[in-house]
Each structure stands twice: as structure tokens, then as C-alpha cells.
Amino acid sequence: MLENETEIVIEWKKGNKKAYEALVRHYMADAFMVAYGYVHDEEDARDLSQDAFVKAYQARESFDAGRPFYPWLYRIIKNHCLNHLKRVARGGGSLYYDNDPDRERFVAAEPTPLQRLEREERKAIVRAAIELLSEDHREIIMLKNFKGCSYAQIAEILDIPIGTVMSRLYYARRQLKELIERIEVEGIPESGGCLSHGSPAGEVI
């Protein structure tokens, strides 16, 4: 258990991102090992464990601050991995589209015209959100989700440890998701820089 975990969790539930960073750093390796135990693939295990942290952050209001954090996180990881394995068993491939990091791959092989239109609109939103990312976050999203680089390849390209790749990619994906959600509400901005009532495009979350 993380030292002062109860106090850290209380701050996290208040929306303190620094507090959640402490939880992520402490449990990142454990989360990866849990995911790997289910999927037996390093790349997918890293992706799934990071997804689980995002899901946990979004569900913070439902967490009882008087209970240990890790067992709750473990259940989120387990359920996410089991759902992933079910989708793969139905014929899915890798976890993400190479050209669309916000949509999972498992969709109908023959989309309807309406689905194609919605997909194009979604891609436009994702592209706009990527343009609003900080340079470091945009770079790592491009390498992982557009170029299909492995974590080891990204670490070599950027000359950083794999642990740093995992951490940076986690924050990049979380920031991308937040930007996509804001664009869906506010619309695609006509020019870069800022979204209304939000953070500057270059701010690192």
C-alpha cells in the first residue's frame, strides 16, 4: 500500500491530478503485470493497463475513499482485460486502429453509409484534438497509434526509458480523450491555441 494512500485518494477524488499521478506511478508496474497475466502480450498489457488507469480516473466519484485503492483498480484491470479477450475471440485484432487512437478496432466489416459518415466525422474530431496536444504528447501518439511502433522502438527513437514511454503515453491518451470530449461539446475550433473554458493547447496534463 502506498504511504499516505488514504490522504492521496481523498485528494484524487477532489480532482487533484497530481495526487492521481502518485497513484499511477506507484501501481503502474503492478497494473502491467496483472494485465500481462491475462493477455500474455507485452504491448497489449501496457495498453490495457493504461486504459484501466483512465477508467479508474473517470470513475473516481464511485470509489470509497475508506477502502484500499489497489483491489478496486485490480477489478477494473481484470474486467477490461476479459472484455478485450472476448472481443479478440470474436475476430478482433490489435487494440486500436492505427489511424484512430480513440476508437477500438472491433466494428462491423461492412459499415453503412451513416456509419461511414459518422466515422469520418469522428476522424475529423480526433485529428483536431491531436493538433491541440502538446508537442511531446502529439509525438508519442503518432509513434504508437499512427506508426505502430512498439514501446521498445519508441524508447529507442526518443532515447528515453520504457517506463517513461508508458507514463508519457498514458498522459497523452488521457489528454487526447479529454480534448475529444470537449470538441464533441464545443465543436472543432477554427484555429489552434485554446478551447473555450479550457487549458491552452500546449499544457501538459
Image: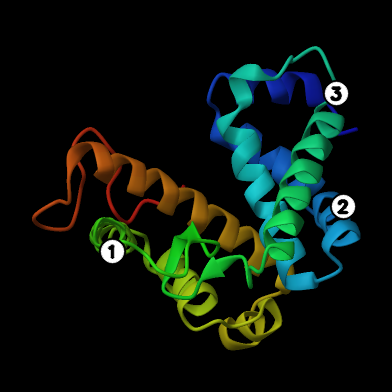
| Vertical arrangement, residue 166 with respect to residue 194, above or below | below
Residue beneath disc 2? 34
Q: Is residue 30 above or below residue 133?
A: above
Q: Secondary structure at mark 2?
A: helix
| Residue holding disc 3 | 68
Along the line of sight, the residue nearer the viewer: 161 or 145: 145
Instruction: Judge depth for marks 2 and 3 and give the one in front.
Output: 2
Question: In the displayed structure, does residue 133 sit left or right of residue 156?
Answer: left
Per the image, the residue denoted by label 1 is 116
Q: Give residue 120's quadrant in the image.
A: bottom left
Q: Residue furthest left?
A: 190
Question: Observer-nearest residue: 38 or 145?
Answer: 38
Pointer 3: residues within 10 angstroms few (<14), some, or many (20+)?
A: some
Q: Position of residue 131 (x, y in %)?
A: 28, 64
Q: Are marks 2 and 3 in contact (CB under 8 Å)?
A: no
Question: Residue 164's mark?
Answer: none
Kind of residue at badge 2? Val
Quadrant of the rendered structure where residue 14 is?
A: top right
Mark nearer the N terminus (3 vs 1):
3
Amino acid type, residue under disc 1 in the picture? Arg
Q: Is residue 160 left or right of residue 199?
A: right
Residue found 64% across the figure and 72% down from its top: 93
Task: Give the mark nearer the N terminus: 2 vs 3.
Answer: 2
